Image (tube, rainbow, N blue to C red):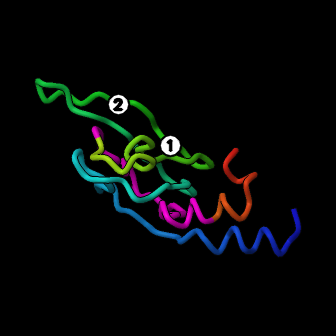
Amino acid sequence: MERNSFDIICSYFKPRTYAKNEILLSEGQICETNYFVNEGCLRFFSLNKDGTELTRYFAFPGKFGTALSSLIDQKPSFEYIESIENTVVLEISRKDFFDLVERFPAVNYL
């Protein structure tokens, strides 16, 4: 990949910091963001009928995470996204992600 292409791809991502136990997405909200974790950890969980938390995934540094079905279908999320420690991410909006994939189809394989 050319350096110019890499710079263009990077320009789509915005750094953001979340405090420990901060909720990034709640059940019922429509997900608009994909997260790449630089530092810290994100937890993806849902609640069962009894209110018990069921963890689906942890996004550690170097990993992407999102409520994928909500992000793609634009339907309310069935899960929460929470930072379980102070966390630094690179965020990309749904719109920007699809624009990026259209420009650089190989990005879709990440």
Q: Decide: few, some or many residues near mark 2? Use Cα within 10 Å; few <14, some 14-19, many ≥20.
A: some
Percent position of residue 85, x then y: 39, 51
Numbered range of the magenta stretch: 78-99
- Label 2 – label 1 distance at C-alpha: 11 Å
Q: Is residue 56 above or below residue 102?
A: above
Answer yes or no: do the residues labelled 2 and 1 have beta carbons within 8 Å? no
Residue at 45%, 48% (x, y): give it. Answer: 72
Q: Residue 59 bears which disc, if any?
A: 1
Where residue 3 appears, as percent x and y from the top left, is: 86, 71
Quadrant housing residue 27: top left
> Which amino acid lies under the numbered mark 2 shown in the image of this protein?
Thr
Image quadrant holding the N terminus, namely bottom right
Q: In which quarter of the image is residue 4?
A: bottom right
- Could you tell me if residue 78 is visible in this image? yes
Q: Does the magenta stretch include residue 75?
A: no
Q: Residue at x 36, y 51 (%)?
A: 74
Q: Where is residue 69 in the image (x, y as percent from the top left)?
A: 41, 40
Residue at the outermost right position: 2
* Category of crowding for the residue at label 1, using alpha-carbon neighbours closer than 10 angstroms: few (below 14), some (14–19), many (at least 20): many
Compared across the picture, whether 101 is left or right of 59 comes to right
Question: Disc 2 designates what residue?
Answer: 55
